[in-house]
Amino acid sequence: ANIGNAFPEIWQDTMSVLQDQVPPKDWDTVCAIVENDMKKPLSECFATFEREPIGAASIGQVHRATLLDGTPVVVKVQYPEVERLFRGDVRTIKLF
């Protein structure tokens, strides 16, 4: 991931691991997040939903899926804890 020049290079090197080398969440967790967000079972939203993500990062992961009408899509699944962590990060940055 690219965080640009917002931080000194030593910080960028240190933080890059936090962004790029993240294992994906397990299928049960992903399914629960999507169903909670959609307020219905996956089967009522998607004809297919691949269990293996295309990619994963610190804030979420992306899955290939197909809508009920056959349209191929990708679904970005944001982890529930991200907003809380992001707000904490912003507060920390403001201290500098």
Image (spheres, rainbow, N blue to C red):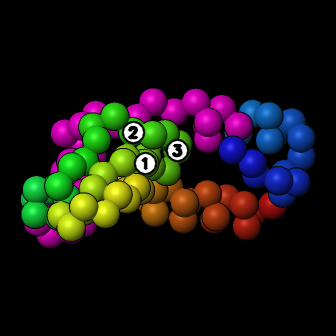
Q: Secondary structure at mark 2?
A: loop
Q: Is residue 42 visible?
A: yes
Labels 2 and 1: the sequence-earlier one: 2
Tell me the amino acid under the disc marked 2. Pro
Which label belongs to residue 53?
2
> Which residue corresponds to mark 3?
58
Cα gap from disc 1 to disc 3, whole angstroms = 12 Å
Question: Which region of the structure is painted magenta?
Answer: 16-40
Tell me what residue is drawn at x 54 percent, y 60 percent: 86
Q: Determine the CA span between mark 3 and mark 2.
A: 14 Å
* Residue marked by disc 1: 62
Q: Position of residue 58 (x, y in %)?
A: 52, 44
Marks 2 and 1 in Cβ contact (< 8 Å): yes
Amino acid at dot 3: Ser
Please give the name of the residue rendered at 27% of the width and 56% of the height, measured from the top-left corner. 66
* Amino acid marked by disc 1: Val
Observer-side mark, 1 or 3, equals 1
- The residues tagged by marks 2 and 1 sit, at their Cα atoms, a distance apart of 5 Å
Say which quarter of the image contains residue 39.
bottom left
**Residue 80 in view in this figure:** no
Find numbered disc 3 in the image and state the secondary structure of the residue it sits on. loop
Q: Give the residue drawn at x 45%, y 61%.
A: 84
Q: Magenta stretch mostly in which secondary structure?
A: helix
